[in-house]
Image: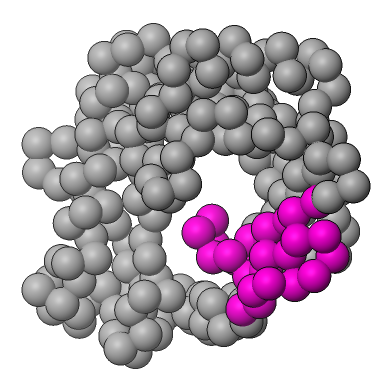
Amino acid sequence: FPEHINISCSGNIIKNVKGVKVPNAGGLKGVGAAAVLGVVGGNADLELEVLEDVKPAQIERTKRLLEQGFFSCRLLENVENLHIVATVTAGAHSASVTIINRHTLITEIAKDGEILYKADCIGDSSTEKEAWDFTVKDILEFAKTVSPEKIEPILEPQIRLNTAIAEIGFAEKYGVQVGQTLLTCLDNNVYVRARARAAAGSDARMGGCSAPVRQSPIWQAEAMNRFAVQLPIPSGV
């Protein structure tokens, strides 16, 4: 077991995690809670659900380690928005793993200063940036002409997963319950219901709910020729 873990990461990661409850972490927040709990009770085979099997005793151990200074964090400047270097040390030995551009894209593994694995991360970043190189006119043209069958495999999982977490946000008391408040205080029309669903999903996710959220995987649709989609509101929303 390591004696210390340091997380060096981009400002975007620090900002995103700072005030958000870590899923399955008993209300713990921040980079430190996520990193230390991952060391104590994480299951790397589950990838983005790495903390799904965490036990209460592991949460308590994480709290003690955080109090003992087991964790430190350093800001990386002038790097990709998603850039994380996790370094663990024990005695004179160390090991580090670097992730860039995607949460499951390991770009480097090193042990005691020797690089054991290295992968190129440039392709993912450039592809995503190219996918966003369109205008409002392009978006409208695509929305008017695209065949629904062509985009259904991309949008169906997004609608299904995001609808599910929105329902959780409505049913349970997460965060400041913005979604529930919108439905209670504003007119009952499609615009309010759409905003309330988005807010309820955010309430749940930011409040530590472990249910998955799906963004539009635009960079996975290069074959669609400058893919851009405005998510439709399903009937009955």
Q: Is residue 127 above or below residue 236?
A: below
Q: Main secondary structure of the magenta part?
A: strand
Quarter of the view holding residue 188? top left
Name which residue lies at 75% across and 54% down: 95
What residue range appears in magenta?
94-119
Quarter of the view holding residue 36? top right
Q: Is residue 2 above or below residue 46?
A: above
Q: Is residue 219 above or below residue 176?
A: below
Name which residue lies at 59% across and 10% down: 60
Is 98 a magenta residue? yes
Residue 81 locus on image (x, y percent) = 69, 59
Pick the front one: 138 or 60: 60
Pick the front one: 33 or 41: 41
- Which quarter of the image is occupied by the C terminus? top left
Horizontal side of 133 relative to 15 (left or right) equals left
Name which residue lies at 25% across and 43% down: 161
